Amino acid sequence: MNISTGGGLTMSLDERLEAAHAAKPELCSLNMGSMNFGLYHITAKYSEWKHDWERGYLEDTRGGIVSNTFEQIERVIEEVGGAYGTRFEFECYDVSHLYALAHFLDRGLLKPPLFVQSIFGLLGGIGADPEDLMHMRRTAERLFGDDFVWSILAAGKHQMALCTTGAIMGGNVRVGLEDSLYIGKGKLAKSNAEQVAKIRRILAELSLEVATPDEARDILKLKGGDEVGF
């Protein structure tokens, strides 16, 4: 169970940490830098809205910024990692975030293996071209050597294709409705499970094995599901 500390785009850090403090999880996310997080451009695709707040929420990202300062990152590491033995999914939306991660590793605040989630295709972060994927991989290898576990997250239409490319390169993959609402071109996914089943079929066709929960815990050096707060 991976608990978010990113939360919503308008939440304070205290609000973003509430779930982690309550759950004391094995794993939680940690964004590795402040960034523009643009969603406003997708409003042009829609003429009808289900809820009154939707359009305004998206439009507000034109002038907003997602705050993850060095001070905030250090606080999450200490309050969640140090207090509960929680490991982190380090969410890196651009190359600079990898260097920020290396900074905290060099200071001795983190211990490998680092679970590096490289994120592609969001407006304000790195693009979703295969060259971007390879650049992030090369940079992570230069900074961390063998001390990291690499994973790929790609937004929207890029999800399945870039995750497959990353898997071929030896990476792990993340899919789900948070990252894309679709299962194929123009077809909405029914659930997270449908997307997971699809990427699993693709990996199986490529003769790539899927880790069991116990194997994943061992790879990421997690504390175990019997040591959480839920």
Image (spheres, rainbow, N blue to C red):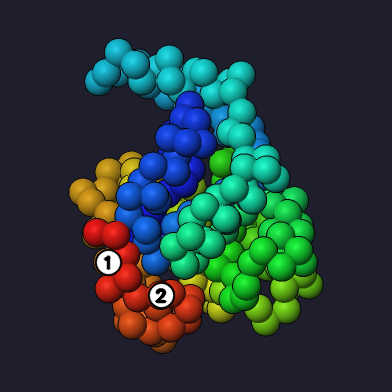
Residue farthest toward the left in the current orientation of the protein = 190
Q: Residues within 10 Å of mark 1 (few under 14, many from 20)?
A: few
Residue pictured at 27% horizontal, 54% vertical: 192
Which of 78 and 180 lies nearest the eye of the viewer?
78
Q: Quadrant of the C terminus?
A: bottom left
Which quadrant of the rendered structure holds the N terminus? bottom left
Residue 49's image quarter? top left
Q: Residues within 10 Å of mark 2 (few under 14, many from 20)?
A: some
- Residue 56 percent across, percent down from the top left: 43, 15
Q: Give the secondary structure at mark 1.
A: helix
The reply, left or right, for residue 184 in relation to residue 29 is: left
Residue at the outermost front position:
83
Q: Which residue is mark 2?
A: 223
- Under circle 2, the secondary element is loop
> Rounded to the nearest whole Å, what is the CA distance between mark 1 and mark 2?
27 Å
Inspect the image, locate mark 2, and give the three-letter code of the amino acid beneath it: Lys
Residue 197, labelled with which disc? 1
